[in-house]
Image (cartoon, rainbow, N blue to C red):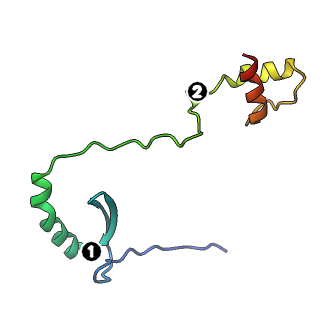
Amino acid sequence: MATKTSVIVTDDLDGSDNASTFSFAYQGTAYEIDLGKKNSSKFSNAIRPYVEAARRVPSQRRPAKPGHASRADQPDRAAVRAWAREQGLKVSERGRISGDIVARYEASH
């Protein structure tokens, strides 16, 4: 037996069907609202003069989370695995390498 799920997006203001999601930001806070044809026109007309007078701000990339190294900052995994085997440590052929093994590798190099 198959299950079919339908998602119906309705206008957040008046409940009308066939709404679309609009994203915007105001005073540093991002918002989303689902609007049908009538309310999306009202929204667009209301903000048009402000958008036309405004300047675009480039999107900002979020900084890496503290304590999370980027791939470029990590040692070569093949080299870590080869070193671990030479040291008699158990390491898998693929997948994650334990933090303890990586730390020992970095301490020895």
Which residue is disc 1 drawn over?
36
Q: Is residue 89 above or below residue 30?
A: above
Q: Nearer the viewer, residue 96 or 21?
A: 96
| Picture coordinates of residue 61, whole percent (x, y) | 40, 41
Residue found 80% across the figure and 19% down from its top: 83
Q: Nearer the viewer, residue 99 or 32?
A: 99
Q: Quadrant of the C terminus?
A: top right
- Please state if 105 lies on the left or on the right of 85 as rendered: left
Q: Is residue 39 above or below residue 75?
A: below
Separation of disc 1 and disc 2 at Cα?
A: 48 Å
Mark 1 residue crowding within 10 angstroms, few (<14) / some (14–19) / many (20+): many
Residue found 10% across the figure and 53% down from its top: 52
CB under 8 Å between discs 1 and 2: no
Say which label, 1 or 2, has the lower sequence index.
Answer: 1
Q: Secondary structure at mark 2?
A: helix
Residue 108's disc is: none
- Please state if 49 lies on the left or on the right of 105 as rendered: left
| Picture coordinates of residue 21, whole percent (x, y) | 33, 66
Q: Secondary structure at mark 1?
A: loop
Residue found 70% across the figure and 25% down from its top: 77
Mark 1 belongs to which amino acid?
Answer: Gly
Q: Is residue 40 above or below residue 58?
A: below
Q: Nearer the viewer, residue 9 or 91?
A: 91
| Picture coordinates of residue 13, whole percent (x, y) | 28, 80
Residue at the far bottom: name it. 14
